[in-house]
Amino acid sequence: MPNVDYDISFHCSDRLQERVGLSKSQKSQEAFLKKVKERGISIKDIPKSEKLYKLLNNYCKDRQEGTYAIYFSNYVVIFTESNIAVTVLNANDNLIKCVKNYCKRRHIDGCYTSKKIS
């Protein structure tokens, strides 16, 4: 088993299978979440004045305090403060468009805005 600095909740495991199409195997889910943590766009790294921050913050709004969102490959993964992956949500079209614009303005490569992970 790979060494990871986060845990996966049972709910998140089910959502990874349902929404992302990953198998129930822990190895494939950990590999996906590793990519999310390494290559995704975290709300922690975005200035609060950005529209992208506000859109990602909407995904965390009614959740436990300390949760944060990471955008990766048309999905938003919600993590707790203690790095537990809580759930995976499909990103809406407005967020996807905003990420593309944010990446263009920041000259970021590897945002994975249109690639599907299978």
Image: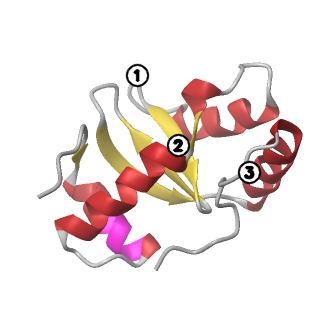
Q: How is the image coloured?
A: secondary structure
Rounded to the nearest whole Å, what is the CA distance between mark 1 and mark 3?
21 Å
Of the residues under marks 1 and 3, which one precedes in the sequence?
1
Range of magenta residues: 14-19
For the residues bearing labels 2 and 3, Cβ distance under 8 angstroms: no
Measured along the vertical axis of the image, is residue 87 above or below residue 55?
A: below
- The answer to whether 78 appears left or right of 40 in the picture is left
Q: Nearer the viewer, residue 54 or 118?
A: 118
Q: Which disc, if any, is residue 95? A: 3
Element class at badge 1:
loop
Provide residue 89's location: percent of width, then percent of height: 50, 57
Q: Nearer the viewer, residue 91 or 3?
A: 3
Q: Is residue 87 magenta?
A: no
Measured along the vertical axis of the image, is residue 67 above or below residue 59?
A: above
**How busy is the neighbourhood of tag 3: few (under 14 within 10 Å), some, or many (20 plus)?**
many
Amino acid under label 3?
A: Leu
Of the residues under marks 2 and 3, which one precedes in the sequence?
2
